[in-house]
Image (cartoon, helix red, strand yellow):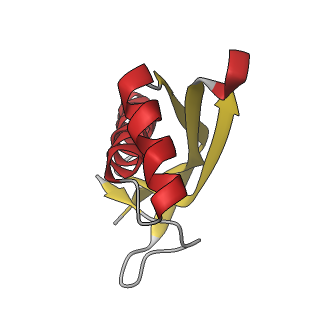
Amino acid sequence: MLLTTTPSIDGKRITQYLGVVSGEAIIGANIFRDLFAKVRDIVGGRSGSYEKVLADARAAALEALEQEAAGRGANAVIGIDLDYEVLGEANGMLMVTASGTAVVVS
């Protein structure tokens, strides 16, 4: 399945619009990862553990979006938008939402 943030796909013609699809992923932050991230924030540098969590959540949200699109008979999703939010007590949860338009292209 083709997934893109653009409103069209070069070389492909949209033959059918199947509606908006979305996928969500909510992932809890690990207390030890939080502790090490705080240390890294103090001394500087990138937080590899949080980057991994973000990448995993994004992949899960896109997979859920792709499954919904496939269930509608789509072979592509265009105009994908990714949103990130923190939720829960002390912002202990990360939510990633992916949404786009399911289409059939030829």
43 w.r.t. 100: above or below: below
Q: How many marks?
A: 0
64 w.r.t. 88: above or below: below
Residue at x-position 71% and y-position 15%: 89
Judged from this view, the residue extending furthest toward the left is 1
Residue 75: % across, % down: 34, 50
> Can the viewer see residue 88?
no
Judged from this view, the residue extending furthest toward the top is 89
In terms of depth relative to the viewer, which is nearer, 106 or 35? 35
Report whether 92 appears left or right of 1. right
Residue at x-position 45% and y-position 46%: 39
Residue 76: % across, % down: 39, 55
Judged from this view, the residue extending furthest toward the bottom is 11
> Can the viewer see residue 36?
yes
* Image quarter hosting the C terminus: bottom left
Report whether 61 appears left or right of 84. left
In terms of depth relative to the viewer, which is nearer, 15 or 92? 92
In terms of depth relative to the viewer, which is nearer, 106 or 86? 86
Residue at x-position 66% and y-position 34%: 86
Residue at x-position 56% and y-position 32%: 94
In terms of depth relative to the viewer, which is nearer, 55 or 63? 55
Report whether 102 appears left or right of 53. right
Residue 11: % across, % down: 36, 84
